[in-house]
Image (cartoon, helix red, strand yellow):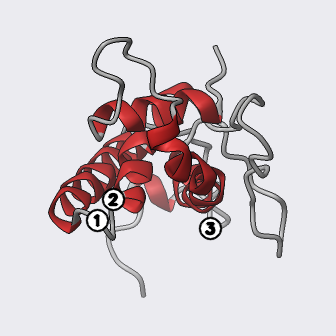
Amino acid sequence: MATTAQQVFELAMHLMDEANLSTGQVDIADTRDYKNRTLAILNILRQECYPASDTFQTAGPGKRPSCPEIENFTVPIALDDGICQGVLPYGLAAHLLLEENPDMASYFHQRYEELLRTCAKGLPASSEEIFCPYGHIELGEFSRWT
């Protein structure tokens, strides 16, 4: 499943307790201002999260890797679902609440950073054999150099 910006927005609204109490809907008139700011904020956060995502690819020598831009609410975000559903909603909520509730924004930002670090640590790493041009000294055949 590929997560969209709409899904991240909905998760952030639930975190911020902005859902309609009777229907659970989050895309309502009260959240319109938040939605207008969402894509711009997500496009900033995607660059921070990209190195921790399993979709990260190096761009080649001398080029900075970049995650594709989020253009609308319906296109899947080019990050893995763990980042999109578990990390981005906290970062989005933190930025949306910065002006009106700094304490809550601080909590969400701290949680965003913790989750991002956790995701980066859990990313599977690859390994490769190291070539030794000096031949067999890695086996301890020499006790000292003369």
Camera-near label (1 vs 3) is: 1
Q: Which mark is residue 97?
A: 2
Q: Position of residue 62 (x, y in %)?
A: 83, 76
- Kindly tell me whether residue 84 is visible in this rendering: no
Residue type, mark 1 in image: Glu
Counting residues from the N terminus, which is met first, the one under dot 2 or under dot 3? 2
Left or right for 132, reference 20: right
Camera-near label (2 vs 3) is: 2
User: Relative to residue 88, is residue 98 depicted above or below?
Assistant: below
Residue under label 3: 134
| Alpha-carbon span between mark 2 and mark 3 | 58 Å
Q: Position of residue 139 (x, y in %)?
A: 43, 51
Residue type, mark 2 in image: Leu
Q: Secondary structure at mark 3?
A: loop
- Kindly tell me whether residue 61 is visible in this rendering: yes
Task: Please identify the quadrant where the N terminus is shown.
Answer: top right
Residue under label 1: 100
The local crowd at label 3, few if under 14, some if 14 to 19, many if 20 or more residues have their Cα within 10 Å, is few
Query: Mark 2 near mark 1, Cβ–Cβ under 8 Å?
Result: yes
